[in-house]
Image (spheres, helix red, strand yellow):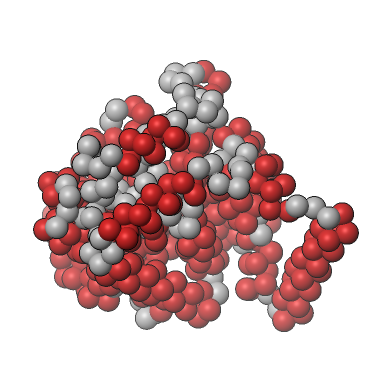
Amino acid sequence: MAVSLKTKSERTSPLAWLGAVIERILPVVTFLTALGTFVRFGVDPLAWLAVYGMTTYQVAMNFDKFKEAFISSWIVFLVPLLTLISTFWSAAAGHTMSVSIQFIFTTMFGLWLGAVYSPRQIFRALAIAAAVGVIASVINGQLQFISAYSNYDGFFVGIFTQKNVLGRVIVLLSVSLFVVSIATRNLLVFTIGAMLVVALFFPLNAAESATSLVMYLFVLTFPVVWLFVSGSESMRLVVVLSAVGALLLGLGVTAVVDIDLVNKVLAKLGKDSTLTGRTYIWSVGWQMVQWKPILGLGFDAFWFGDTFDEPALIAEAYGEAINGFHNAFLEVLVSLGIVGEIAFIATLLAVLFRVFRWLFAERSVESLGAAYILTIMFIMSFVEIIGFRNHDINHILMVMFYAMAYYRLHGRNTSRQPA
Protein backbone atom coordinates (compact mmCIF):
# COMPACT_ATOMS: atom_id res chain seq x y z
CA MET A 1 0.00 0.00 0.00
CA ALA A 2 1.37 3.40 -1.03
CA VAL A 3 2.47 5.78 1.71
CA SER A 4 0.55 9.07 1.78
CA LEU A 5 2.66 12.17 1.24
CA LYS A 6 0.04 14.53 2.70
CA THR A 7 0.76 16.47 5.85
CA LYS A 8 -1.32 15.92 8.97
CA SER A 9 -3.24 19.14 8.41
CA GLU A 10 -4.03 18.13 4.83
CA ARG A 11 -5.25 14.73 5.95
CA THR A 12 -7.56 16.25 8.56
CA SER A 13 -8.89 19.15 6.46
CA PRO A 14 -12.63 19.20 5.62
CA LEU A 15 -11.95 18.73 1.88
CA ALA A 16 -9.68 15.75 2.56
CA TRP A 17 -12.32 14.23 4.82
CA LEU A 18 -15.02 14.82 2.19
CA GLY A 19 -12.85 13.27 -0.49
CA ALA A 20 -12.20 10.19 1.64
CA VAL A 21 -15.93 9.72 2.31
CA ILE A 22 -16.80 10.07 -1.36
CA GLU A 23 -14.06 7.61 -2.30
CA ARG A 24 -15.49 5.02 0.07
CA ILE A 25 -19.15 5.26 -0.90
CA LEU A 26 -19.07 6.21 -4.60
CA PRO A 27 -19.12 2.69 -6.11
CA VAL A 28 -21.99 1.48 -3.90
CA VAL A 29 -24.06 4.64 -4.41
CA THR A 30 -23.46 4.53 -8.18
CA PHE A 31 -24.49 0.88 -8.43
CA LEU A 32 -27.53 1.31 -6.18
CA THR A 33 -28.75 4.16 -8.35
CA ALA A 34 -27.94 2.59 -11.72
CA LEU A 35 -29.66 -0.66 -10.74
CA GLY A 36 -32.91 1.28 -10.36
CA THR A 37 -33.21 0.80 -6.60
CA PHE A 38 -34.66 4.26 -5.93
CA VAL A 39 -36.97 4.76 -8.93
CA ARG A 40 -40.26 3.73 -7.32
CA PHE A 41 -39.49 5.66 -4.13
CA GLY A 42 -39.32 8.94 -6.06
CA VAL A 43 -35.76 9.78 -5.04
CA ASP A 44 -33.99 8.54 -8.17
CA PRO A 45 -33.25 12.08 -9.46
CA LEU A 46 -31.68 13.01 -6.11
CA ALA A 47 -29.61 9.83 -6.12
CA TRP A 48 -28.32 10.57 -9.63
CA LEU A 49 -27.59 14.14 -8.59
CA ALA A 50 -25.41 12.73 -5.79
CA VAL A 51 -23.58 10.46 -8.25
CA TYR A 52 -23.01 13.37 -10.65
CA GLY A 53 -21.73 15.56 -7.84
CA MET A 54 -19.43 13.01 -6.22
CA THR A 55 -17.93 11.79 -9.49
CA THR A 56 -17.41 15.30 -10.83
CA TYR A 57 -15.71 16.28 -7.57
CA GLN A 58 -13.34 13.31 -7.73
CA VAL A 59 -12.54 13.93 -11.40
CA ALA A 60 -11.87 17.63 -10.74
CA MET A 61 -9.55 16.81 -7.85
CA ASN A 62 -7.69 14.16 -9.88
CA PHE A 63 -8.04 15.42 -13.44
CA ASP A 64 -4.66 14.04 -14.60
CA LYS A 65 -5.86 10.57 -13.64
CA PHE A 66 -9.08 11.03 -15.60
CA LYS A 67 -7.18 12.34 -18.62
CA GLU A 68 -4.92 9.29 -18.57
CA ALA A 69 -7.93 6.97 -18.36
CA PHE A 70 -9.68 8.82 -21.18
CA ILE A 71 -6.67 8.58 -23.49
CA SER A 72 -6.30 4.83 -22.84
CA SER A 73 -10.02 4.09 -23.30
CA TRP A 74 -11.28 6.84 -25.63
CA ILE A 75 -13.25 4.48 -27.85
CA VAL A 76 -16.01 4.08 -25.25
CA PHE A 77 -16.88 7.76 -25.77
CA LEU A 78 -17.33 7.31 -29.53
CA VAL A 79 -21.00 6.29 -29.47
CA PRO A 80 -22.00 8.76 -26.70
CA LEU A 81 -20.43 11.62 -28.68
CA LEU A 82 -22.27 10.47 -31.81
CA THR A 83 -25.54 10.59 -29.88
CA LEU A 84 -24.81 14.22 -29.00
CA ILE A 85 -23.93 15.06 -32.62
CA SER A 86 -27.21 13.43 -33.71
CA THR A 87 -28.97 16.38 -32.08
CA PHE A 88 -28.40 18.28 -35.35
CA TRP A 89 -30.68 15.92 -37.32
CA SER A 90 -32.80 14.47 -34.54
CA ALA A 91 -36.58 14.40 -34.84
CA ALA A 92 -36.66 15.50 -31.17
CA ALA A 93 -33.57 17.69 -30.87
CA GLY A 94 -34.08 19.01 -27.33
CA HIS A 95 -34.72 15.57 -25.90
CA THR A 96 -31.79 14.05 -27.79
CA MET A 97 -29.41 16.70 -26.48
CA SER A 98 -30.55 16.14 -22.88
CA VAL A 99 -30.26 12.34 -22.87
CA SER A 100 -27.01 12.44 -24.87
CA ILE A 101 -25.33 14.60 -22.23
CA GLN A 102 -26.55 12.14 -19.59
CA PHE A 103 -25.14 9.31 -21.71
CA ILE A 104 -21.72 10.99 -21.85
CA PHE A 105 -21.74 11.45 -18.07
CA THR A 106 -22.80 7.80 -17.63
CA THR A 107 -19.73 6.82 -19.64
CA MET A 108 -17.59 9.03 -17.42
CA PHE A 109 -18.95 7.27 -14.31
CA GLY A 110 -17.87 3.89 -15.63
CA LEU A 111 -14.47 5.13 -16.78
CA TRP A 112 -13.71 6.66 -13.38
CA LEU A 113 -14.73 3.58 -11.41
CA GLY A 114 -12.58 1.37 -13.61
CA ALA A 115 -9.59 3.69 -13.34
CA VAL A 116 -9.38 4.23 -9.58
CA TYR A 117 -10.87 1.16 -7.87
CA SER A 118 -9.51 -2.37 -7.72
CA PRO A 119 -11.53 -5.25 -9.21
CA ARG A 120 -12.13 -6.69 -5.75
CA GLN A 121 -13.50 -3.40 -4.44
CA ILE A 122 -15.81 -3.14 -7.43
CA PHE A 123 -17.26 -6.63 -7.02
CA ARG A 124 -17.75 -6.07 -3.29
CA ALA A 125 -19.61 -2.83 -4.01
CA LEU A 126 -21.71 -4.50 -6.71
CA ALA A 127 -22.57 -7.37 -4.36
CA ILE A 128 -23.64 -4.92 -1.63
CA ALA A 129 -25.76 -2.80 -3.98
CA ALA A 130 -27.46 -5.76 -5.64
CA ALA A 131 -28.03 -7.49 -2.28
CA VAL A 132 -29.75 -4.38 -0.94
CA GLY A 133 -32.12 -4.44 -3.92
CA VAL A 134 -32.92 -8.14 -3.64
CA ILE A 135 -33.35 -8.14 0.15
CA ALA A 136 -35.55 -5.04 0.00
CA SER A 137 -37.61 -6.71 -2.73
CA VAL A 138 -38.14 -9.86 -0.67
CA ILE A 139 -39.11 -7.82 2.40
CA ASN A 140 -41.44 -5.69 0.29
CA GLY A 141 -43.01 -8.84 -1.10
CA GLN A 142 -44.02 -9.78 2.44
CA LEU A 143 -44.93 -6.38 3.87
CA GLN A 144 -46.09 -4.58 0.70
CA PHE A 145 -44.80 -1.10 1.51
CA ILE A 146 -45.30 -0.50 -2.21
CA SER A 147 -46.89 -2.88 -4.69
CA ALA A 148 -44.51 -5.80 -5.19
CA TYR A 149 -46.30 -7.06 -8.28
CA SER A 150 -46.57 -5.64 -11.78
CA ASN A 151 -49.85 -3.97 -12.70
CA TYR A 152 -49.32 -5.19 -16.25
CA ASP A 153 -48.80 -8.95 -15.90
CA GLY A 154 -48.96 -9.57 -12.14
CA PHE A 155 -45.40 -10.90 -11.88
CA PHE A 156 -43.18 -10.21 -8.89
CA VAL A 157 -41.07 -7.04 -9.28
CA GLY A 158 -40.13 -6.35 -5.65
CA ILE A 159 -39.07 -2.71 -5.32
CA PHE A 160 -38.21 -2.39 -9.00
CA THR A 161 -40.23 -1.20 -11.98
CA GLN A 162 -40.18 -4.40 -14.04
CA LYS A 163 -39.55 -8.10 -13.59
CA ASN A 164 -36.60 -7.95 -16.00
CA VAL A 165 -34.95 -5.26 -13.85
CA LEU A 166 -35.26 -7.46 -10.75
CA GLY A 167 -33.96 -10.40 -12.77
CA ARG A 168 -30.94 -8.40 -13.94
CA VAL A 169 -30.12 -7.43 -10.34
CA ILE A 170 -30.32 -11.08 -9.26
CA VAL A 171 -28.00 -12.17 -12.09
CA LEU A 172 -25.43 -9.50 -11.20
CA LEU A 173 -25.66 -10.43 -7.52
CA SER A 174 -25.07 -14.10 -8.40
CA VAL A 175 -21.88 -13.30 -10.33
CA SER A 176 -20.65 -10.97 -7.57
CA LEU A 177 -21.30 -13.53 -4.83
CA PHE A 178 -19.29 -16.14 -6.70
CA VAL A 179 -16.42 -13.71 -7.31
CA VAL A 180 -16.30 -12.38 -3.75
CA SER A 181 -16.61 -15.80 -2.09
CA ILE A 182 -14.04 -17.52 -4.33
CA ALA A 183 -11.61 -14.64 -3.83
CA THR A 184 -11.51 -15.35 -0.08
CA ARG A 185 -10.02 -18.82 -0.80
CA ASN A 186 -12.11 -20.11 2.08
CA LEU A 187 -14.20 -23.21 1.43
CA LEU A 188 -16.79 -22.31 4.07
CA VAL A 189 -17.24 -18.80 2.68
CA PHE A 190 -17.56 -20.18 -0.85
CA THR A 191 -20.13 -22.75 0.32
CA ILE A 192 -22.21 -20.01 1.94
CA GLY A 193 -21.90 -17.85 -1.18
CA ALA A 194 -22.96 -20.73 -3.43
CA MET A 195 -25.96 -21.47 -1.20
CA LEU A 196 -27.01 -17.82 -1.41
CA VAL A 197 -26.75 -17.96 -5.21
CA VAL A 198 -29.00 -21.04 -5.25
CA ALA A 199 -31.47 -19.29 -2.92
CA LEU A 200 -31.72 -16.44 -5.42
CA PHE A 201 -33.62 -18.80 -7.70
CA PHE A 202 -36.76 -18.32 -5.62
CA PRO A 203 -37.26 -14.55 -6.11
CA LEU A 204 -36.15 -14.98 -9.74
CA ASN A 205 -38.70 -17.72 -10.26
CA ALA A 206 -41.40 -15.48 -8.74
CA ALA A 207 -40.45 -12.73 -11.20
CA GLU A 208 -40.72 -15.14 -14.15
CA SER A 209 -38.19 -13.18 -16.18
CA ALA A 210 -37.29 -15.65 -18.92
CA THR A 211 -34.17 -13.87 -20.17
CA SER A 212 -32.84 -13.44 -16.64
CA LEU A 213 -33.54 -17.09 -15.83
CA VAL A 214 -31.46 -18.22 -18.80
CA MET A 215 -28.61 -15.94 -17.75
CA TYR A 216 -28.90 -17.16 -14.14
CA LEU A 217 -28.49 -20.75 -15.29
CA PHE A 218 -25.44 -19.65 -17.25
CA VAL A 219 -23.98 -18.01 -14.11
CA LEU A 220 -24.32 -21.33 -12.23
CA THR A 221 -21.48 -22.64 -14.40
CA PHE A 222 -19.12 -20.04 -12.91
CA PRO A 223 -17.41 -22.30 -10.30
CA VAL A 224 -16.83 -25.01 -12.89
CA VAL A 225 -15.36 -22.57 -15.39
CA TRP A 226 -13.21 -21.12 -12.61
CA LEU A 227 -11.78 -24.57 -11.99
CA PHE A 228 -11.06 -24.81 -15.68
CA VAL A 229 -9.39 -21.39 -15.80
CA SER A 230 -7.32 -21.75 -12.64
CA GLY A 231 -6.86 -25.49 -12.30
CA SER A 232 -4.41 -28.02 -13.64
CA GLU A 233 -4.44 -29.44 -17.15
CA SER A 234 -6.03 -32.66 -15.91
CA MET A 235 -8.84 -30.72 -14.20
CA ARG A 236 -9.46 -28.75 -17.39
CA LEU A 237 -9.69 -32.00 -19.35
CA VAL A 238 -12.26 -33.37 -16.89
CA VAL A 239 -14.34 -30.20 -17.17
CA VAL A 240 -14.26 -30.17 -20.97
CA LEU A 241 -15.12 -33.87 -21.27
CA SER A 242 -17.95 -33.51 -18.75
CA ALA A 243 -19.40 -30.53 -20.61
CA VAL A 244 -19.17 -32.28 -23.98
CA GLY A 245 -20.71 -35.44 -22.52
CA ALA A 246 -23.61 -33.53 -20.99
CA LEU A 247 -24.24 -31.74 -24.30
CA LEU A 248 -24.20 -34.96 -26.31
CA LEU A 249 -26.49 -36.66 -23.79
CA GLY A 250 -28.95 -33.78 -23.97
CA LEU A 251 -28.97 -33.80 -27.77
CA GLY A 252 -29.39 -37.59 -27.79
CA VAL A 253 -32.38 -37.51 -25.45
CA THR A 254 -33.94 -34.72 -27.53
CA ALA A 255 -33.53 -36.74 -30.73
CA VAL A 256 -34.90 -39.96 -29.20
CA VAL A 257 -38.09 -38.47 -27.73
CA ASP A 258 -38.61 -36.07 -30.68
CA ILE A 259 -39.05 -32.95 -28.56
CA ASP A 260 -39.87 -29.65 -30.24
CA LEU A 261 -37.13 -28.13 -28.14
CA VAL A 262 -37.45 -24.46 -29.05
CA ASN A 263 -41.20 -24.19 -28.48
CA LYS A 264 -41.02 -26.34 -25.34
CA VAL A 265 -38.38 -24.14 -23.80
CA LEU A 266 -40.18 -20.97 -24.81
CA ALA A 267 -43.44 -22.27 -23.35
CA LYS A 268 -41.72 -23.21 -20.10
CA LEU A 269 -40.32 -19.69 -19.88
CA GLY A 270 -43.67 -18.10 -20.59
CA LYS A 271 -42.70 -17.12 -24.15
CA ASP A 272 -44.04 -17.87 -27.61
CA SER A 273 -42.36 -17.87 -31.00
CA THR A 274 -42.70 -14.07 -31.18
CA LEU A 275 -40.67 -13.73 -27.94
CA THR A 276 -43.54 -11.91 -26.22
CA GLY A 277 -44.19 -9.55 -29.10
CA ARG A 278 -40.58 -8.66 -29.76
CA THR A 279 -40.74 -9.71 -33.40
CA TYR A 280 -43.50 -7.14 -34.03
CA ILE A 281 -41.44 -4.40 -32.37
CA TRP A 282 -38.42 -5.42 -34.43
CA SER A 283 -40.42 -5.19 -37.66
CA VAL A 284 -41.43 -1.62 -36.80
CA GLY A 285 -37.82 -0.77 -36.02
CA TRP A 286 -36.62 -2.17 -39.33
CA GLN A 287 -39.13 0.05 -41.15
CA MET A 288 -37.61 3.08 -39.41
CA VAL A 289 -34.11 1.95 -40.39
CA GLN A 290 -35.13 1.76 -44.05
CA TRP A 291 -36.47 5.30 -43.85
CA LYS A 292 -33.20 6.86 -42.57
CA PRO A 293 -30.49 4.19 -42.86
CA ILE A 294 -27.29 6.29 -42.78
CA LEU A 295 -27.60 8.60 -39.75
CA GLY A 296 -30.84 7.44 -38.15
CA LEU A 297 -33.56 9.48 -36.45
CA GLY A 298 -31.43 10.83 -33.60
CA PHE A 299 -30.69 9.34 -30.19
CA ASP A 300 -33.93 8.20 -28.48
CA ALA A 301 -35.98 10.44 -30.79
CA PHE A 302 -38.30 7.64 -31.95
CA TRP A 303 -39.67 7.00 -28.46
CA PHE A 304 -40.01 10.60 -27.32
CA GLY A 305 -43.44 12.19 -26.98
CA ASP A 306 -45.72 12.27 -30.02
CA THR A 307 -42.99 12.65 -32.63
CA PHE A 308 -44.02 9.37 -34.29
CA ASP A 309 -47.28 7.38 -34.27
CA GLU A 310 -45.65 3.95 -34.10
CA PRO A 311 -44.77 3.97 -30.36
CA ALA A 312 -48.45 4.40 -29.50
CA LEU A 313 -49.37 1.51 -31.80
CA ILE A 314 -46.68 -0.65 -30.20
CA ALA A 315 -47.95 0.22 -26.72
CA GLU A 316 -51.49 -0.68 -27.78
CA ALA A 317 -50.40 -4.03 -29.20
CA TYR A 318 -48.04 -4.76 -26.31
CA GLY A 319 -50.40 -3.74 -23.51
CA GLU A 320 -47.99 -1.28 -21.87
CA ALA A 321 -45.74 1.64 -22.77
CA ILE A 322 -42.47 0.56 -24.43
CA ASN A 323 -39.36 2.71 -24.69
CA GLY A 324 -37.02 0.45 -26.63
CA PHE A 325 -36.83 -2.13 -29.41
CA HIS A 326 -35.56 -4.92 -27.11
CA ASN A 327 -32.49 -5.24 -29.31
CA ALA A 328 -29.43 -3.05 -28.82
CA PHE A 329 -28.22 -3.35 -32.42
CA LEU A 330 -31.61 -2.38 -33.83
CA GLU A 331 -31.91 0.47 -31.34
CA VAL A 332 -28.57 1.88 -32.52
CA LEU A 333 -29.57 1.51 -36.17
CA VAL A 334 -32.80 3.42 -35.63
CA SER A 335 -31.11 6.15 -33.59
CA LEU A 336 -27.74 6.57 -35.33
CA GLY A 337 -28.01 4.59 -38.56
CA ILE A 338 -25.24 2.58 -40.15
CA VAL A 339 -22.60 5.07 -38.96
CA GLY A 340 -23.62 4.57 -35.33
CA GLU A 341 -23.89 0.80 -35.77
CA ILE A 342 -20.30 0.58 -36.96
CA ALA A 343 -19.14 2.62 -33.96
CA PHE A 344 -21.25 0.54 -31.56
CA ILE A 345 -19.95 -2.80 -32.86
CA ALA A 346 -16.36 -1.50 -32.85
CA THR A 347 -16.78 -0.48 -29.20
CA LEU A 348 -18.23 -3.85 -28.22
CA LEU A 349 -15.42 -5.75 -29.94
CA ALA A 350 -12.78 -3.52 -28.34
CA VAL A 351 -14.26 -4.08 -24.88
CA LEU A 352 -14.57 -7.83 -25.31
CA PHE A 353 -11.05 -8.13 -26.73
CA ARG A 354 -9.39 -6.18 -23.91
CA VAL A 355 -11.31 -7.85 -21.08
CA PHE A 356 -10.66 -11.35 -22.39
CA ARG A 357 -6.99 -10.43 -22.80
CA TRP A 358 -7.08 -9.52 -19.11
CA LEU A 359 -8.68 -12.87 -18.30
CA PHE A 360 -6.11 -14.89 -20.25
CA ALA A 361 -3.19 -12.85 -18.87
CA GLU A 362 -4.18 -12.77 -15.20
CA ARG A 363 -6.55 -15.74 -14.79
CA SER A 364 -8.02 -14.11 -11.68
CA VAL A 365 -11.53 -14.70 -10.40
CA GLU A 366 -12.28 -10.98 -10.85
CA SER A 367 -11.27 -11.07 -14.53
CA LEU A 368 -13.47 -14.13 -14.99
CA GLY A 369 -16.34 -12.27 -13.31
CA ALA A 370 -15.87 -9.35 -15.70
CA ALA A 371 -15.80 -11.74 -18.67
CA TYR A 372 -19.00 -13.42 -17.46
CA ILE A 373 -20.84 -10.12 -17.07
CA LEU A 374 -19.74 -8.91 -20.50
CA THR A 375 -20.73 -12.23 -22.08
CA ILE A 376 -24.16 -11.92 -20.49
CA MET A 377 -24.46 -8.36 -21.80
CA PHE A 378 -23.49 -9.43 -25.32
CA ILE A 379 -26.03 -12.25 -25.37
CA MET A 380 -28.75 -10.07 -23.85
CA SER A 381 -28.08 -7.29 -26.37
CA PHE A 382 -30.02 -9.31 -28.95
CA VAL A 383 -33.24 -9.25 -26.87
CA GLU A 384 -32.72 -6.16 -24.67
CA ILE A 385 -31.09 -2.72 -24.96
CA ILE A 386 -27.62 -3.19 -23.50
CA GLY A 387 -24.92 -0.53 -23.52
CA PHE A 388 -26.95 2.12 -25.33
CA ARG A 389 -28.82 3.95 -22.59
CA ASN A 390 -28.14 6.90 -20.35
CA HIS A 391 -27.96 6.00 -16.63
CA ASP A 392 -27.71 2.31 -17.57
CA ILE A 393 -25.93 -0.12 -15.23
CA ASN A 394 -24.86 -2.27 -18.18
CA HIS A 395 -23.13 0.62 -19.91
CA ILE A 396 -21.40 1.65 -16.69
CA LEU A 397 -20.12 -1.89 -16.12
CA MET A 398 -18.98 -2.28 -19.72
CA VAL A 399 -16.95 0.94 -19.67
CA MET A 400 -15.65 0.23 -16.16
CA PHE A 401 -14.30 -3.22 -17.04
CA TYR A 402 -12.73 -1.84 -20.23
CA ALA A 403 -10.82 0.82 -18.28
CA MET A 404 -9.98 -1.60 -15.48
CA ALA A 405 -8.58 -4.17 -17.91
CA TYR A 406 -6.17 -1.58 -19.33
CA TYR A 407 -4.58 -0.93 -15.95
CA ARG A 408 -4.50 -4.61 -15.01
CA LEU A 409 -2.81 -5.51 -18.28
CA HIS A 410 -0.20 -2.82 -17.70
CA GLY A 411 0.53 -4.14 -14.21
CA ARG A 412 -0.60 -1.08 -12.36
CA ASN A 413 -2.59 -1.16 -9.14
CA THR A 414 -5.01 1.74 -9.47
CA SER A 415 -6.68 1.31 -6.10
CA ARG A 416 -6.08 3.89 -3.42
CA GLN A 417 -7.61 1.64 -0.81
CA PRO A 418 -6.51 -1.77 0.42
CA ALA A 419 -8.21 -4.54 -1.55
Where residue 57 appears, as percent x and y from the top left, is 16, 53
Residue 397 in view (yes/no):
no
Front one among 396 and 94: 94
Q: Residue at x 55, y 46 (%)?
A: 275
Q: Residue at x 48, y 62 (%)?
A: 378
Front one among 137 and 249: 249
Give the quarter of the figure containing the N terminus: bottom left
Q: Residue at x 37, y 46 (%)?
A: 324
Front one among 167 and 85: 85
- Among the 4 quarters of the image, the one containing residue 219: bottom right
On screen, 133 above or below 365? above
Give the quarter of the figure containing the C terminus: bottom left
Front one among 52 and 273: 273
Q: Residue at x 43, y 20 (%)?
A: 146
Where residue 211 appears, as percent x and y from the top left, is 56, 48
On screen, 58 above or below 208? below
- Among the 4 quarters of the image, the one containing residue 298: bottom left
Where residue 408 appears, as percent x and y from the top left, is 40, 74
Instruction: Classify residue 191 as left or right of residue 401.
Output: right
